[in-house]
Amino acid sequence: MEGMYLLNPDVDSKHRASLLTEHKLVPLVTRTAKVDWSIHPLWVERLKWAGLLPFARLVEATETSRHLSIDSSLLTCLVDRWRPETHTFRFRWGEMAPTLEDVSMLLGLPLAGNAVGLLEDPPDWQQTLAARFFNIYDGAPILASEAHGPKYDWLQHFRIERFPGYSQVPLSAIQITRSLEAYLLWLLGKVMFTENHVTTLSARYIPIALEIATAELAEQITPRSWGSAVLAATYRGMCNSCHLSTSKSAILGCPLFLQLWSWERFSIGRPNIDVDHSYHVGNMLDGDDIDLPTFGLCWTCRKRRYASEQTRRAYTTLNEQSDTYTGVIWQPYTEVVRIFRYPGGISVLCTRDRGYWMTKSKIIFDVFVEEMAQQRIMRQFGLRQLTPPPNTDNLLSVVVHRMTRKGTNRTRAQWLQRLEEYVLEWEIATKRRWHEQQAFDLAEYNAYLEGYMRGTRLRIVQHSNTDEIPDPHTCDTYPTYDTSGSRQYAGELAYSLHTDVMNFDRQLSSASLMVPRSQIQPWLKRLEQRIRDIYKAITCTRTSDVVHHQPQPTPVPRHSVHRHQPRPRLQGVEPTPHPPPPDQPGSSAWHQPQHHASSSSFMFQPTPQHHNPTPGFMYHPHPTGMVPPAYHGVSASGSGLGSEPDELPSHQNMWLDMFSTPPPWPTQDTQYDQGGSEIPPCNISPPPHMWGWSTPPTPPERQPRRRE
């Protein structure tokens, strides 16, 4: 992998990550439903036969649940880092991607079964659909449709809440069947496989919905690999949307799955939920162990809270946080977490098809064929990452990967001929697998990072000063916190530091006067590290944090309203000085010069002659236990604490530089604070004589005119 250029120039020239360095892009949008649908108890058995019941529970409308809105800004940040060349996200700590394991654990969709291949519109779907739903209840509207499919507004009339007297009168058998058919059209078209059509749903889902709704036995429903289809649709949606930069461009596929995947692994944009309390299954008791929770259920059904300091739906800020984030959760589905969250157990569909997780077979949805890259993200499975990652036996051609229905007029036979190879390949998916058995090894992962960091774009946000962001380091893969840089995190650190100092003070008060060095030195090391973390959390991390205020405009003197006083003359007012540049003393982002390693550039530019990486992309791995490059020259173990009094430890030099930062330049909120406090006053009033003249005296009272 060393010296390998991982960015395809043809793909990268139109990629959003390449355009972000020169243009300000807007976040993408989603086409998901805005309202959840309720599930009728008589639907449960047929949804279970089809393998859709655990997924349907994620978007079920109940009295206690609240609709999960999709954070398009967060998903756009992921799409900006998606690379169609490898089907992985490119982060500064390595590659990651949603896998079939994530589909099983988060959504509970089956992987075993037929590939969801070619979907076709029924030839006379409008007439048959209108006949089935005609007069299903008194006042039911007639079919409203377009060439693409039925209207979404028309379909919502058949939610079970819309039926007259639903809460008092039980629905008939035909009403149960028709309402389930409408529900499946909504579930497939607005949740699992979203499209650019906002007002209509695709008519290609009508045969599947009709088959499930009218089934009387489980054998009458074709077993389908819904999990691989959702992953294929999501992959294709990200491959297309990473090249879109116009407004109203959409992320297609299954945005719900992508958001749940992000929340499980990163704290960026993630809500707070009651994970400290285990999930009680309640009425979800099932003899088949299918109607049980999945890992995604805690995010959709529990109460979600966002902290006041937490960034949400802020595309630019989320992108900057993604460039400097360190709190990665590589394996969120461990047995310990599973027992803690769901002591009553999880759905059997979450683990039943684990034999498909490492398959080399292509995944299919409709006419889309996608390829997975588990060999590049072995760390997500807790396995050894080979360097370089091996290639698959049968690479997917670019022509097949670009297949779409747009601009084509192929017949059914032609589509089946193109897809036949990959449909047959999925039938033997459990036999074509990656057989890596060795556990994860950090040294080998460092070797993989050496080649990876030389040949790809590590950050996509163009910061004003690249030295302000530390270089990527393997320590990023072992986080100690998830909310770095926030005021909430700084408060937690300060409270923890205060508690530690108070406890140590009590120990000293009850111990002898001469405390051994072996007891006090470890405490001082922890104290040093916590103070350093607090300083890092509350200081500026970007040059854009500096307030660039403009000089005060020249005030216009008001006309005198007093008849006996002359108009005051405007005296000279000194202009407000400009703040110094961010790299000069006096700015809020300025620090004393420190000796840092050279920062990595944003994108590797190969030379035309040799195509070798630039020296700025050299990656120097540090041994385990050392601190990130932002603290070069400072020992993480605090060895200077044991030095002689006449020596100046290295960590004290760093502290002198750290805490000798001059105060920030006055801002619009603090320039009139006469008390010198760092907290701006609540009511700021201009000082006296700021306009250049004194207050005119009160004119004498006028004497009343005497009448002659």
Image (tube, rainbow, N blue to C red):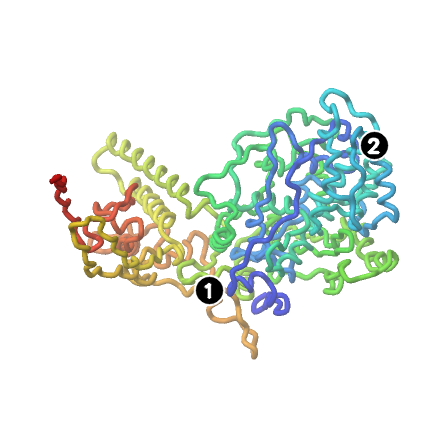
From what the image shows, is residue 587 above or below residue 42? below
Q: Label 1 to label 2, Cα distance in Å? A: 67 Å
Q: Give the mark nearest the N terminus, 1 or 2.
A: 2
* Three-letter code, disc 1: Ser
The image's mark for residue 135 is 2
Residues at marks 1 and 2 touching, judged by CB atoms closer than 8 Å: no
Task: Locate residue 309: give its quadrant.
Answer: top left
Q: Say which of marks 1 and 2 sits in front.
A: 2
Which percent across, then down, holds residue 360?
72, 54
Seen from the viewer's position, the closer of residues 577 and 610 is 577
Query: Label 1: which residue?
Result: 600
Instruction: Give the quadrant of the N terminus.
Output: bottom right
Which percent across, then down, holds residue 212?
81, 37
**Residue 527, can we see it?**
yes
Which percent across, then down, holds residue 430?
76, 48
302 relative to 702 in the view: left or right: right
* Three-letter code, disc 2: Asn
Residue depicted at 62% across the width and 27% down the height: 63
145 relative to 344 in the view: left or right: right
**Residue 660, can we see it?**
no
> Number of numbered discs present?
2
Seen from the viewer's position, the closer of residues 563 and 80 is 563
Instruction: Give the quadrant of the C terminus.
Output: top left
